[in-house]
Image (spheres, helix red, strand yellow):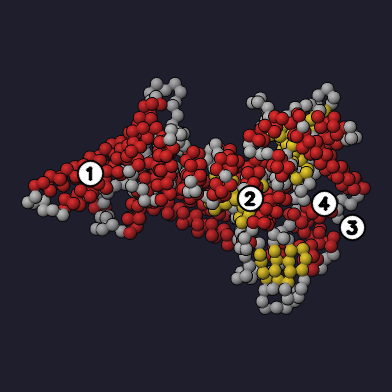
Amino acid sequence: MRRPDWYIKQLRERVSIADYAGKRLTWDRRKSRPAAGDYWAPCPFHTEKSASFHVRDREGAFKCFGCGEGGDVFKLCQKLEGLDFVGAIDKLAAEAGMPPPETTPQAQAAHDARGRLMRIVAAAHGLYRKALRGPEGAPARTYLEGRGLGPDAWDQFGIGYAPDQWTFALDALGKDGVRREDMIAAGLAREGGRSGAIDLFRHRVMFPIADAQGRVIAFGGRTLSADKDTPKYVNSPESEVYHKGQVLYRLKEARETLARNRKADGGEGFVVAEGYLDVAAFERAGVAAVAPLGTALTDEQLQLAWKAGGAPILCFDGDSAGLRAADRALDTALPHLGPSRTVRIVMLPAGLDPDDVFRTSGPEALKALLATAIPADEALFLREKGRRPLDTPEARADLQKRLKDAAARIADPDTRRQYDRAFNDRYYALVRAAPRAPYVKGARAARGQEPPATPTPELRALTQVQYSSKIEGMVRLAADHAYVLRAGADVFARLPIADPDLDRIRHAILDLWAASKPVDRTAISHHLLSAGHQSAAGAVLRWTPPVATKRREGDPEAPPPEEEAQKVEAEWMAFLTLDVTSPQVVKEIDEARQRDLDTDKDAFVAALAAVTARRNLHGAAIARGSADFDPDAKPGSAPDDRVL
C-alpha cells in the first residue's frame, strides 16, 4: 500500500544514509572524511578490492563508481535488503521509530485535514505580512527598524504583524469561509471571549516558522506591549502540522546558506542560536543559523543539525538561562557524539547577544565570536570543574567520577575512549598547576623529602603558569571593577604583560577609561572587535563570570560598599606595584652584584636598599592578600582555582 508523500518526506529528513549503510558496510578510513559527511567502502553489489562505493550523508545519496549503482537511502535499502519500495520505507521507519501511517479512510481524512490547516496558516501569514505594511503596523515597523530590520529584511524573513485586536485573524479569515474550529486547530486562535474565540497573537511582531520544505506551519510572536506580565514571546501550540521538538527555525534557508559557503573539506555545520533575531543576525552576516522553538534542544533537532554538518556551534547568552541551556544541550548531545558528530560551544557575556554584536560591530565581529567556540570535551570539563571547589581530596575524586560518568554516556566506543583520555589529561594538568604550599626549611627534611637542589623543568613551568594567572587576574579585576583605575591607571599602564592578547585587553580598558566611557566586559569586547582584535575579544568572552560580593541584609558587621571597594583597590594596588616595581628592583640588585661590595661602600648601600625594597614589596603584597591573586575572591579570603 502506498505511503503518503508527507510521511516519506519526514522519514527522509530523519534517516541518515551514513548511519544505515555504516551498520552494513566497512568504511575505508583512509578515504572517508566523516567530518565532511563523505564515506567510502568496497561496493556491496560487485566484487572489488578498492573502495569505490561513495556515500554522501548530507545529500542522502550513494554512488558506486565501479558498477554504476546509485540513488537515495530508499534505493540502497531496497538493494541491500531485497525489498520493494514500500518495504524499504517500512524497514527504515522501524529503525527510525516512525510507525507507518494507517491506510484507512480515517487516515486519508487526517491527511486532508493537515493540508487544510497548512492552507489556513499560509493565509494567516499573508494577513500578518500585509498588516505590517498597513497603517496598523506602525508600532511594529518602528520596533523592527530600531533593531536594524528594514523592509528588505521583512521580505527576507517573512516578518509580519498581528494587530492589537481581539479577533483580527478570526474576522479576516472567517470572511473567506474558514471555520473557527479550524483556526483553533491551526494554532491561530483559542477559546475565550464573548464570541467564543479570540486570536492567539495580538500586538506582536510575527516570525513565520516553516518545515524543512519551507512551508509555513506555525508562528512565533514577539510582544510590543509594555505590560511586564505579558510574555515576551508566544509560539504556536502543537498541532497536526507543527511539532516544535522536530522543527528548527530557518532550517531550509540555513541549508542553502551552508551549501553556498561550504569549503572543500567542510566540517562546518549550523550555528544553533537561541532566538529569531539572533538567527536573523547570523543569516544577514552570511552564516548558516537555526534556532529551537521555545524549548531546549531536542534529539530530533540535533539530528537535523548533524545531517547538515558534523560540528554545529551552539551559541548561548552568558546569563544563567543561557548556562542552563548549554548544560542541557551538552547532555542531549553526549550519547550521540562520534567521529562525524560533535558540537562546539560559544558563551556570550551576560547582556550581549548576536543581534547586538551585528548591529554595533558588524558581520565580521559576529563571525569572530564563532572563532571562540570551544569543543565539547572542554565545555564538559569546565562545567564539571566549576560545580564545586577542588580544595579537598574528596572534591577532586568527585570530579574524576563525574568526568568518567560523562564519558561513559557516549555510545561510540572509540569516541568514549578519547573522551576518557582527554578528561584525564585535563584533570592531571589542573592538579599539576594547582598552587602548592611554600617550602619551609627543615619541614620536609623531617620527613626525608628535601627539595631538589635546582628547579626542575616542571617546577619552572608551574611557576610560569602561576605568574601568568596572577597577571591575568589583575587585568580581569580592572575589567570588572574599573574604579581601581582611579588610583592605579598609570601603574597599570606600565605592568609588564608578555601575552599580546592580554596586553590588547589592558589597552582597551585604558582607552575606555581615558575616554570616560563605561568599562565592562561587553564594552571591552566591542572595543577589541571594532579594532580587529578578534583573538583578544575571544579571550574576554572565555573568562568565567565574576563572583559578585553582596552585603548580607541586616548584618551590622558587613562593610559598606565603599569600604569593600577600598579593600579591593588596596589589594589590587599592592600586587600591581609589586609586579611593576620588582623588575626594576631585580635589575638594581644585578647591577650591584657586578661591583665589589666588600670595598665599594656606595655599591653595598645600593644593594642593601634594593634587597630591602624587594622584601618590603613582597611583605606588602602578602599582607594585603594571598600569594595567588584571585579577582573572583572577596578581599582577604583564601584563593581558589576559578581564575583558571
**SS class of the residue under badge 4?**
helix
Tag 4: residue type?
Trp
- Closer to the observer: label 2 or label 4? 2
Looking at the image, is mark 4 or mark 1 earlier in the sequence? 4
Tag 3: residue type?
Met
Whole-percent x, y for residue 363 in the image: 58, 47
Whole-percent x, y for residue 572 in the image: 34, 37
Q: How many neighbours does mark 3 have within 10 angstroms: few (below 14), some (14-19), or many (20 or more)?
A: few
**Residue 149 has which mark?**
none
- Closer to the observer: label 1 or label 3? 1
Q: Residue at x 46, y 34 (%)?
A: 518
**Residue 401 visible to the viewer:** no
Quarter occupied by residue 579? top left
Cα distance in 3D space between marks 4 and 1: 78 Å
Q: Which residue is mark 1?
A: 614
Q: Is residue 99 above or below residue 138?
A: below
Tag 2: residue type?
Gly
